[in-house]
């Protein structure tokens, strides 16, 4: 399945704007694929960015990449980051929004490795350890 994070980011962004508030992203700046101005990254590796329509240009909230142009201390900068690097989206005025938690990595492509869609995990000897899906029974 695709990640739900980009969908939630778009929905929360619209919700914050619909309530006449200012949407901010909290981003894990050290995550793979994040391009932000490093001088504004905090010691704990995070950056907060105002993504309101008046603060950014060309905002694109796509499933694979969030991108926009913003000014940082008067200098224009093109920002890009994967949605998985977004830790939270919230309204500046009241803190309402959603905390997503840890950085979400890109899904592993089907190649026989972990995340290949297999229903059963195996141990070192190749035996089943547990099913990823619950076992359901028909009850009459």
Image: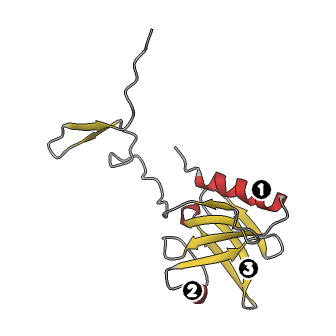
At label 2, counting other C-alpha atoms closer than 10 Å, the crowd grade (few under 14, some 14-19, many 20 or more) is: few
Label 3: few (<14), some (14–19) or many (≥20) C-alpha neighbours in 10 Å: many
Spatial distance from mark 2 to mark 3, Cα to Cα? 14 Å
**Residue assigned mark 2:** 38
In the displayed orientation, state which residue is furthest to the left: 125
**Residue bearing the label numbered 3:** 70
Q: Quadrant of residue 127?
A: top left
Q: Which mark is residue 15?
A: 1
**140 above or below 71?**
above
**Which mark lies nearer to you, 2 or 1?**
1
Label 1 vs label 3: CA separation? 21 Å
Q: Is residue 133 left or right of residue 39?
A: left
If you read the primary sequence from the N terminus, does the residue marked by circle 2 or circle 3 appear first?
A: 2
Given residues 62 and 4, the one toward you in this image is 4
Quadrant position of residue 24: bottom right
Q: Residue at x 81, y 62 (%)?
A: 17
Marks 2,1: beta carbons within 8 A = no
Q: Residue 105 vs residue 68: left or right?
A: left
Position of 123 relative to 105 (above/below): above
């Amino acid at each position: 399945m695709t990640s739900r994070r980009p969908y939630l980011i778009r929905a929360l962004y619209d919700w914050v704007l619909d309530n006449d508030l200012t949407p901010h992203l909290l981003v894990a700046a050290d995550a793979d694929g994040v391009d932000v101005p490093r001088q504004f990254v905090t010691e704990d590796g995070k950056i907060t960015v105002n993504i309101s329509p008046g603060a950014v240009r060309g905002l694109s909230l796509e499933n694979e990449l969030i991108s926009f142009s913003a000014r940082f201390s008067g200098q224009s900068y093109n920002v890009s980051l994967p949605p998985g690097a977004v830790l939270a989206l919230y309204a500046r005025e009241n803190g309402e929004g959603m905390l997503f938690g840890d950085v979400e990595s890109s899904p592993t492509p089907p190649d026989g490795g972990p995340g290949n869609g297999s229903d059963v995990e195996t141990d070192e000897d190749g035996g089943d350890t547990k099913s990823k899906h619950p076992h359901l029974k028909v009850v009459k």
